[in-house]
Amino acid sequence: MKKYSIIVFIPLLIACNKKMIDKQDKAQELVKSYLNKNLDDSTSYQPGTFRKIDSITESQFSGENVNYVRHGVLPPDTTNHKGFYGYTLVHEYRAKNKLGAFVKEDKIFYLDTGLTRVIVVQ
């Protein structure tokens, strides 16, 4: 019986992990696209590390996340389950500023629930 439960559990675990990897990849591409359009010199962009994508939920209402919800930047998505507000992705990168000097940045990108747009960057 234990062998059968392991056989059922492993594909389920793999499927869940693949879904999370797909979201991570989609979020990273969204952030890269956003930076390409919004950096002072997008050709100088040097990607660094991406942290793991994180969801914004009611249980995480502390500090600045709750301020974005209160001010309408991250409205609750009524089409999804209650309390899901989107995702955050932290990205470290280097790019040239307006003066042409390389600057190292470590930014938090707030993404919508469908991973279709960057809402705000902090």
Image (cartoon, rainbow, N blue to C red):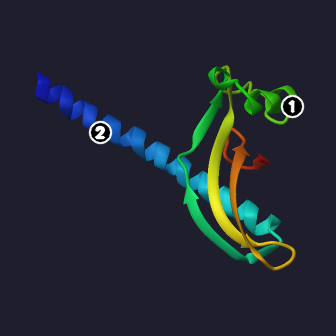
Residue 97 or residue 77, whichever sits in front: 97
Residue 47, located in which quarter of the rendered image?
bottom right
Q: Is residue 26 above or below residue 101?
A: above
Please report contact status of discs 1 and 2: CB closer than 8 Å, yes or no: no
Query: Residue shown at 67%/42% (left/top)?
Result: 114
Judge the density around disc 1: few (<14), some (14-19), many (≥20) Cα neighbours within 10 Å: few
According to the picture, the residue beneath numbered tag 1 turns out to be: 72
Query: Residue shown at 19%/26% (left/top)?
Result: 5
Residue 82 on image: x %, y %: 67, 19
Residue 88 on image: x %, y %: 65, 42
Judge the density around disc 2: few (<14), some (14-19), many (≥20) Cα neighbours within 10 Å: few
Relative to residue 52, is residue 96 drawn left or right? right
Q: Amino acid at mark 1?
A: Gly
Relative to residue 73, is residue 82 drawn left or right? left
Which mark's residue is nearer the viewer, 1 or 2? 1
Q: Amino acid at mark 2?
A: Pro
Query: Residue shown at 75%/50% (left/top)?
Result: 117
According to the picture, the residue beneath numbered tag 2 turns out to be: 11
